[in-house]
Amino acid sequence: MPRLMSFPFRLDGTGAVASVEQDTNAEIEEQLAIAMLTRPGERIVVPTFGVADPAFSRFQLGALQKQCLDFGPDVTVTAADTQLLPDDREQVSIRWERRDEEREVANL
């Protein structure tokens, strides 16, 4: 599998550019982080890319799911847990599942 430059940009322990393997859970997590840290309008060529700043309206799970449908990754966001940190920042933990994986369905 090809390797892609990691987000955020950093160097690994050997001094090389850190990378992540394409189509892995790690790459999906980095894609979700990019979407959550980009505000609509920041990317001039794709002005609808990103999720609105949750500082004034709290985190919107539906906005992140719409982002995934419009731009990828091909996942369903199943839940989001928010936690207020001591410095008044909000930490959001996302749970997701791939839409391209086959699901085993029980025959009842």
Image: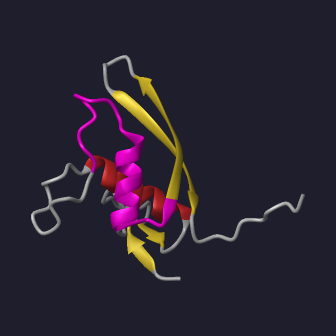
Nearest the viewer among 44 and 22 is 44
Seen in the image, is 99 located left or right of residue 102? Answer: left
Q: Is residue 105 left or right of residue 107?
A: left
For the C terminus, the image quarter is bottom right
Magenta-drawn segment? 51-75
**Residue at 20% in and 59% down:** 48
Q: In the image shown, does 34 or 57 lie closer to the viewer?
A: 57
Q: Is residue 18 magenta?
A: no
Residue beneath the point at 78% across and 65% down:
104
Q: Position of residue 53 (x, y in %)?
A: 23, 39
Q: Position of residue 74 (x, y in %)?
A: 48, 67
Q: Quadrant of residue 103?
A: bottom right
In the image, taking residue 85 as reference, residue 37 lies left or right, namely left
Which percent across, then down, holds residue 99? 57, 66
Return the x and y of residue 75 as percentages of the image width and height: 51, 61
Does the magenta portion include 54?
yes
Residue 60, by quadrant, is top left
51 in relation to 14, above or below: above
User: What colour scheme does the image use?
Assistant: secondary structure
